[in-house]
Image: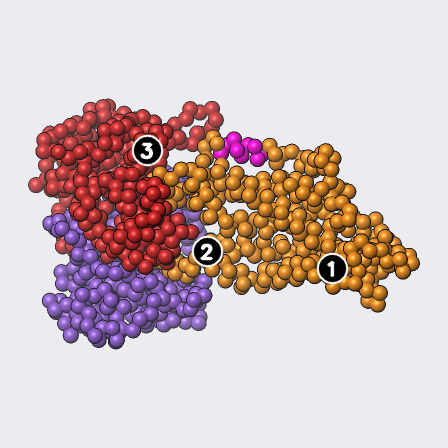
């Protein structure tokens, strides 16, 4: 398993192949009022050593995509399609590969650290539990590893922290503890679902630094967020989701410099920034994001899209690939170089 | 954020519609509701169906108390005075239900008003109001009721007043807890910011939002009251002749248990069925109305 | 001559902390510490700060939802205390609020039309009732909602629609000052922009003053003429928008602005200055130093004076106020 390597850095192979390959994944929920499709036929890859950001608003399905890939859906949810981790299918009828990687080679960090941390156990005990439960290390080694990992996430005074309870830590420290817990087994992939949303902005910057260092050390990272500023600071590639589908996928610089999908462009334009002149009106997108379960023919963004025409309301655009960029739009923005 | 959107979509039909759906899906609760309905119907129609009257002594029988039989029309048998038990059991059920409903209504009205006010006002007022509840809780209410019946005589109205006057305590505690939680919600802060006086806020914003809980506990209070009234009757303090209640019938039947077991059987069976059904229904309502489900 | 609408002086709000034992002396969490604030007619003032800075408590104290230990709140020159019924009623007619949770700030048992009508009757008195329906529709229209939505319940509407309804409820009585307590923080990014535009539009059209409380500096920059920065219950800096974002002076303000992630993947500028000394000491509730400047524990420029004596707000000219012993001598940004 290789978790006894004492450092989270220095991974041997960072070849550019797919660590996580999701193909035609759909996530559905059975509700009393019918089937709600949270994710619709999404295909995505996460390569080794990269940070892939998945950006979207509420109802976009960005969280359900990863939860579905790793069998973490709520009771009434089901995932169809394929999700392969290092070549092994996770969604097959055989649950063994899923159980083998979940928690050891793949770890997750959530928005509210109080959801990941048990209130009545000390930090040290929770961190050690991760490796002791699976008998990967003995108690002595587990304790040493806990302190080492806390140091790696830049937790101040790690030796003192292991004896403390979650409520004695500040919000930022708790999130670091949650990240440390995820890193205990030296995973290949870390999925972070809105890890900084609940944090103060000064703390957010530090937590992002920790994640960036982990990524630089060879850890693959999937960052799910709605915050474009955070994305710009750490992501290598960005996937933009809307109404359960990927509408655009591009390397981070290209996405910000010349977005191809009207939604991406509108989103970027509507975020108030500190470094641009203050305009009288923020460029907002009319209407609201569709609720999960709303079905309509054609493109889900068409009702809000300034460039929508007839075809948009009738035929759902497919995700078209052009080199490193992909976009699902009948009329991608011209200056992006991805025009059809 | 996505998770919460999904959760809200899955359960966003509003409290009552959602609750009804959950309740209908709970087979035990539905069966219980049907049983309650049947018992109520039987209580109303039973005395009309039988050829006998409530107080009518059947002199044709010898001895006067006789077991159930189909040919003489005494389907549940007769009691020691020769009166038909079928009619008496259902008439008694009517009385028990009436007492229970009225007493529950009294305890709901007082309990909700007290609890909502205490919970919303909080602080010292809440402290004092709930101390009153605590003290009353500590009083041996059985003695209290006995003293009342001794002083004022045994009347139906007194019974349900006495029961209701005690039953509001639990309701007040429960409502107070809900009101305390509601007080933190932003729509209450908005109402205060509008300058609405406290009594308006309690009446328009707190009480309507605790009704779900109130319905549940009222349904669970009804069987408690029936039992309490039965107990009073068992002690001889319940309703007076010519009225009868399930409790009285059980008391009378218990005396003849060895020689005429049918006198105990019918009223006990109906009492047990009623209590069981109401408890199941109350549980089902609580599960259905609990917003944390799903 | 613009009228001064709201004036807060020396406001202190404390909350009791749980005692270790009944015999230990009670300790207090001072959420707002001897704070001064002013809002003039038509002005939009932004209050920024991180968790624990007291901005929400400040809002609640101004709205008379919590009782301050000391200090005064004056509305249009008249002091208003929490038990001053007449004064509160007068103030509430002109001072209203929009809260953070759009769905939660509306009574789930009332349609939004009923909620707005209730506000109208509460503020204008029962004589407002006959004309209520007309006014409700006018307000819904003004916030960009279809009047047909008046019959819907909050859970049937989206977050953005609920917040518009909450704003309609707040403006139905034609207030002069609107307190917005994290009013856009719970909304999607694309919807946030709509609501910000709505608030800006209302401000322009009606000369409405805004007290906009937020942790999102970019939104505040867009919406507010003046910005007040709070730290652990005290004002550390106050300045007009342009000054505070282009030339922040207080070390905390600078740390805050530097920490905001830019939606721009260009390589980060080389770290010129050390802005915050320790890696993560987000202040917990009781983390305030006993004496001296509240920020001294984190400030890279703190010295003995800072730890001993609390700085007062000084005017640096140009309408900029700052509470720092060393503001004159701090290195300025290139």
Q: Which residue is mark 1?
A: B47
Q: Residue furthest left?
A: C334
Q: Position of residue A100 (x, y in %)?
A: 41, 63
| Closer to the camera in the image, C209 or C276 | C209
- Checking the image for residue A301, the label placed there is none
Check the residue under mark 2 and report the chain it is in: B
| Closer to the camera in the image, B28 or A213 | B28
Q: Which residue is mark 2?
A: B15
Instruction: Quadrant for the N terminus of chain A, please.
Output: bottom left
Quadrant housing residue C275: top left
State the extent of the magenta-drawn residues as a range: B126-134
Q: In terms of secondary structure, where does tag 1 sit? A: helix
Q: Would you say the residues marked 2 and 1 are in contact, meaning their CB atoms lie under 8 Å apart?
A: no
| Closer to the camera in the image, A236 or B105 | B105
Instruction: Report the mark closest to the observer, 1 or 3.
Output: 1
Q: Which residue is mark 3?
A: C88
Instruction: Report the mark closest to the observer, 3 or 2.
Output: 3
Q: Is residue A63 magenta?
A: no
């Amino acid at each position: 398993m290789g978790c006894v390597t004492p450092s989270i850095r220095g991974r041997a192979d960072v070849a550019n192949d797919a660590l996580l390959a999701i193909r035609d994944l759909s996530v559905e929920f059975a509700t009393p009022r019918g089937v709600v499709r949270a994710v619709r036929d999404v295909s995505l890859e996460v390569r080794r050593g990269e940070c892939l950001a998945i950006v979207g608003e509420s109802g976009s399905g960005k969280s359900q995509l990863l939860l579905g890939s790793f069998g973490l859906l709520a009771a009434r949810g089901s995932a169809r399609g394929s999700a392969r981790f290092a070549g092994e299918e996770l969604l097959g009828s055989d649950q063994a590969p899923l159980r083998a990687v979940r928690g050891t080679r793949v770890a997750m960090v959530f928005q509210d650290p109080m959801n990941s941390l048990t209130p009545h156990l000390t930090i040290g005990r929770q961190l050690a539990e991760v490796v002791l439960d699976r008998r990967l290390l003995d108690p002595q080694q587990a304790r040493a590893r806990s302190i080492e990992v806390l140091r790696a996430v830049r937790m101040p005074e790690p030796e003192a922290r292991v004896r403390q309870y979650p409520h004695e830590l500040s919000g930022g420290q708790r999130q670091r503890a949650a990240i440390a817990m995820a890193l205990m087994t030296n995973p290949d992939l870390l999925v972070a679902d809105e890890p900084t949303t609940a944090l103060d902005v000064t703390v957010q910057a530090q937590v992002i630094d920790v994640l960036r260092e982990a990524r630089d050390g060879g850890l693959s990272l999937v960052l799910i967020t709605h915050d474009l500023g955070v994305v710009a600071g750490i992501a290598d590639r960005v996937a933009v989701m809307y109404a359960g589908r990927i509408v655009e996928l591009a390397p981070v610089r290209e996405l910000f410099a010349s977005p191809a999908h009207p939604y991406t462009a509108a989103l970027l334009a509507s975020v108030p920034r500190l470094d641009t002149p203050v305009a009288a009106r923020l460029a907002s997108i009319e209407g609201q994001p569709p609720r999960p379960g709303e079905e309509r023919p054609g493109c889900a963004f068409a009702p809000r899209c300034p460039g929508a025409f007839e075809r948009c309301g009738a035929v759902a655009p497919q995700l078209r690939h052009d080199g490193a960029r992909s976009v699902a739009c009948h009329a991608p923005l011209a200056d992006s170089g991805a025009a059809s | 954020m996505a998770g919460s959107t999904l959760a809200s979509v899955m359960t966003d039909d509003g409290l009552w519609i959602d609750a009804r759906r959950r309740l209908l899906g709970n087979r035990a609760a539905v069966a219980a509701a049907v049983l309650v309905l049947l018992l109520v119907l039987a209580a109303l129609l039973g005395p009309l169906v039988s050829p006998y009257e409530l107080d009518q002594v059947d002199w044709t029988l010898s001895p006067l108390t006789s077991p159930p039989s189909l040919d003489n029309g005494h389907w549940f048998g007769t009691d020691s005075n020769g009166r038909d038990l079928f009619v008496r059991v259902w008439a008694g059920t009517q009385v028990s239900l009436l007492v229970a409903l009225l007493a529950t209504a009294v305890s709901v009205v007082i309990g909700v008003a007290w609890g909502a006010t205490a919970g919303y006002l909080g602080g010292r007022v809440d402290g004092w109001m709930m101390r009153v509840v605590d003290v009353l809780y500590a009083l041996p209410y059985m003695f209290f009721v006995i003293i009342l019946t001794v002083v004022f005589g045994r009347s139906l109205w007194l019974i349900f007043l006495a029961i209701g006057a005690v039953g509001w305590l639990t309701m007040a505690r429960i409502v107070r807890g809900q009101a305390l939680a509601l007080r933190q919600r932003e729509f209450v802060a908005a109402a205060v910011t509008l300058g609405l006086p406290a009594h308006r806020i309690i009446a328009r914003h707190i009480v309507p939002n605790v009704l779900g809980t109130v319905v549940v506990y009222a349904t669970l209070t009804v069987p408690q009251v029936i039992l309490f009234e039965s107990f009073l009757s068992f002690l001889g303090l319940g309703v007076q002749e010519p009225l009868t209640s399930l409790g009285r019938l059980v008391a009378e039947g218990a005396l003849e248990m060895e020689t005429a077991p049918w006198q105990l059987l019918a009223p006990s069976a109906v009492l047990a069925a009623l209590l069981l059904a109401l408890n199941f229904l109350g549980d089902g309502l609580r599960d259905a109305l609990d917003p944390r489900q799903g | 001559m613009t009228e001064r609408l709201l004036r807060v002086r020396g406001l202190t709000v404390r909350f009791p902390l749980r005692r270790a034992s009944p015999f230990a002396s009670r300790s207090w969490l001072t959420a707002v510490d001897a704070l001064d604030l002013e809002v003039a007619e038509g002005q939009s003032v932004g209050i920024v700060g991180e968790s624990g800075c007291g901005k929400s408590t400040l809002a609640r104290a101004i709205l008379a939802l919590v009782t301050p230990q000391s200090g005064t709140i004056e509305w249009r020159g008249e002091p208003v205390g929490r038990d001053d019924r007449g004064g509160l009623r007068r103030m509430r007619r002109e001072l209203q609020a929009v809260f953070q949770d759009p769905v939660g700030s509306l009574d789930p048992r009332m349609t939004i039309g009923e909620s707005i009508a209730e506000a109208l009757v509460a503020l204008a008195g029962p004589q407002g009732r006959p004309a209520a329906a007309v006014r409700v529709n006018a307000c819904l229209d003004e916030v960009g909602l279809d009047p047909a939505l008046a019959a819907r319940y909050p859970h049937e509407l989206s977050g953005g629609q609920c917040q518009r309804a909450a704003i309609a409820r707040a403006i139905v009585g034609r207030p002069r000052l609107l307190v917005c307590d994290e009013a856009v923080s719970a909304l999607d990014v694309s919807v946030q922009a709509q609501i910000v535009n709505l608030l800006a539009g209302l401000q322009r059209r009606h000369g409405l003053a805004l007290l906009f409380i937020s942790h999102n500096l970019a939104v505040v920059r867009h919406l507010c003429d003046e910005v007040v920065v709070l730290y652990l219950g005290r004002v550390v800096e106050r300045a007009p928008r342009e000054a505070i974002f282009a030339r922040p002076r207080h070390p905390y303000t600078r740390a805050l602005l530097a920490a905001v992630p830019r939606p721009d993947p260009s390589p980060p500028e080389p770290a010129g200055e050390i802005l915050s000394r320790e890696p993560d000491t987000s202040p917990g509730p009781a983390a305030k130093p006993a004496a001296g400047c509240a920020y001294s524990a984190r400030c890279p420029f703190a010295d003995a004076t800072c730890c001993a004596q609390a700085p007062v707000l000084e005017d640096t000219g140009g309408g900029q106020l700052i509470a720092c012993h060393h503001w004159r001598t701090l290195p300025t940004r290139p």
